[in-house]
Image (cartoon, rainbow, N blue to C red):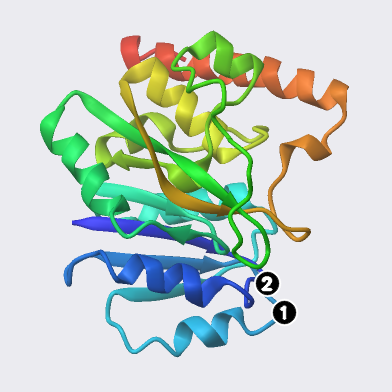
Amino acid sequence: MISVCVATYNGEKYIKEQINSILEQIGKNDEVIVSDDGSKDRTVEIIQNYNDSRVTIYHNVFKSPIRNFEFLISIAKGDYIFLSDQDDIWHEDKVSKYLKIFNEIPMVSLVISDLKIIDKNGIIQDKEFYKKGFKNNILQNIISNNFIGCTMAFKKELKTHILPFPKNIAMHDWWIGLCGVLFDEIYFIDEKLHYYRRHDNNVTNVNNFNFLAKVKFRINMVNELLKRYFKTKYNLL
């Protein structure tokens, strides 16, 4: 079973295109769980209009995409959990190619892929997110986050390591990716299986923080990773 976790907030402009691209490639027993974080637009109405038993919406007021995704992951029932933003588009072969990796390489618990960047109108941009390649190294990723949540899918067993999220992390995908590197195996699909939309109203952007805040986030991240590691490996702390 697949669970797709979709966090929304004022996403009426693109949410239907995103949900449609997901429903077209998942099975009848899979689930799309949406947690709306207090939208003021028609996002909730659009999702409620889906006459599809696979789609469930929850109403929350976390005022935080990090806590929104934490909630979604905690209630996900699937063996494989995919993360989704509200304004992107999935390539038609994304799910099948991710599942192929999980099935063929059992030790892999987290899969991500390359992506195409699109603008607010869906026009593909001449930019490369992974132009220097994907860095599957914990130190490099602490220094510079190489993970992007909307391309992530992981086995349910990884939930044991990533939940609960620490209180003071900058981004949920950063934390999940680092836990994946620390505890299990990560696989990077060198194919563009995701259309990542960049526009003025993107909800999450770590670059909005100042230099001192970024340093503090990294120190806190290392501290939380060490605590989680010793707790998991040696039942300490």
List x then y, in percent, for residue 183: 34, 18
Q: CA distance from mark 2 to mark 1?
A: 6 Å
Question: What kind of element bears circle 1?
Answer: loop
Pointer 2 or 1: first along the chain:
2
Along the viewing direction, whichever of 158 and 199 lies nearer the viewer: 199
Where disc 2 sits, the SS reads loop
Q: Is residue 95 visible?
A: yes
Q: Amino acid at mark 2?
A: Asn
Q: Quadrant of the N terminus?
A: bottom left
Q: Which residue corresponds to mark 1?
A: 40
**Compared with residue 11, is residue 209 higher up or lower down, i.e. above or below?**
above
Q: Amino acid at mark 1?
A: Lys
Point out residue 233 in the picture as x, y percentages from the top left corner.
32, 12
The residue carrying mark 2 is: 10
All told, the count of numbered labels is 2
Q: Are marks 2 and 1 in contact (CB under 8 Å)?
A: yes
Residue 223 in view (yes/no): no
Q: Where does residue 36 sit, x and y in percent of width and height?
A: 57, 69
Residue at 30%, 83% in the rendered image: 52
Residue found 46% across the figure and 86% down from its top: 48
Q: In front here: 4 or 146?
A: 146
Measured as percent of width and height from the top left, residue 23 is found at 32, 71
